[in-house]
Image (cartoon, rainbow, N blue to C red):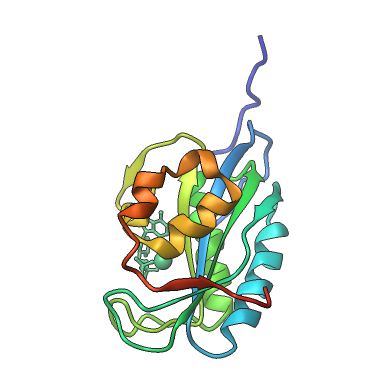
């Protein structure tokens, strides 16, 4: 039987990233941006995500334009990627937040326009319900800007019924993605 290597526990206070090996997991991340050069920000974020420690980019959807949902402001640029990663889920969330901050993300109010939003949609088959992290992402199945790009790279994860339920939401593939 394969034995797991002992791993140091993740300590959010010291913000340490656990680089010790563990069984890799397929994680899906949703990207969105609607301030500044949103297309460029999303593409740069995909590069940053591909370079995360212990992680490898395995799939990337095309880019999409979507109308803001429950919010005002410019249309969003969206995409979904898949990473094969040894990062633990909370470590992954911290990494996502660091990339958001580096892109100039502020949080003035709920659903405010944002230079970059990175959501951990799925982390293998894990169900996580901790104060700072819920996986699967609790709102992902209500959002065409998540399900359409996710269906592009992982059609087995999205049913036609789920897509049909979101038909009213305005979203279209970007011609130059
Ligand atoms: P939203 O993405 O819903 O518009 P934010 O990006 O401002 O909102 O995130 C708010 C909080 O959501 C974050 O502080 C984070 O702790 C929490 N959160 C819970 N689950 C997740 C997840 N699966 N992915 C990303 N953030 C999450
Ligand atoms: Mg978010």
Name the residue rendered at 67%, 51% in the picture: 59
Q: Residue at (60%, 34%) from the top-left corner? A: 7
Depicted 70 relative to depicted 96: above or below: below
Relative vertical location of residue 144 with respect to residue 158 in this rendering, above or below: below
When asked about the image quadrant of residue 70, the answer is bottom left
Residue 39 image point, x, y percent: 61, 80
- Residue occupying the point 41% across, 45% down: 160
Q: Position of residue 86 (x, y in %)?
A: 64, 41
Would residue 144 appear left or right of 175 to someone viewing this image?
A: left
Task: Judge left or right: residue 145 versus residue 103.
Answer: left
Residue at the spot x=42%, y=88% of the render? Answer: 74
**In this rendering, does residue 176 appear at all?**
yes
Q: Can residue 134 be seen in the rendering of this structure?
A: no
Up-down relation of residue 22 to residue 170 (above or below): above
Question: Which quadrant: the C terminus?
Answer: bottom right
- Foreground: 69 or 30? 69
* Residue 64 x %, y %: 54, 71
């Amino acid at each position: 039987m394969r034995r797991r290597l002992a791993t140091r526990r993740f300590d959010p206070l010291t913000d340490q990233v656990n680089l010790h090996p563990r069984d890799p997991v397929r994680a899906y991340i949703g990207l969105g941006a609607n301030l500044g050069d949103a297309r460029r920000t999303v593409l740069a974020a995909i590069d940053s995500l591909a370079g995360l420690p212990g992680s490898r980019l395995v799939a990337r959807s095309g880019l999409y334009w979507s109308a803001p949902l429950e919010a005002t402001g410019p249309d969003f640029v969206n995409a979904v990627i898949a990473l094969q990663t040894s990062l633990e889920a909370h470590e992954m969330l911290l990494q996502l937040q660091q990339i958001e901050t580096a892109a100039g993300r502020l949080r003035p109010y709920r659903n405010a326009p944002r230079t970059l939003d990175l959501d951990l949609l799925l982390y293998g088959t894990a169900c996580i319900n901790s104060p700072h992290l819920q996986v699967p992402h609790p709102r992902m199945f209500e959002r065409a800007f998540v399900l359409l790009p996710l269906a592009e790279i992982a059609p087995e994860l999205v049913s036609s019924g789920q897509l049909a339920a979101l038909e009213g939401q305005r979203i279209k593939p970007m011609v130059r993605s």
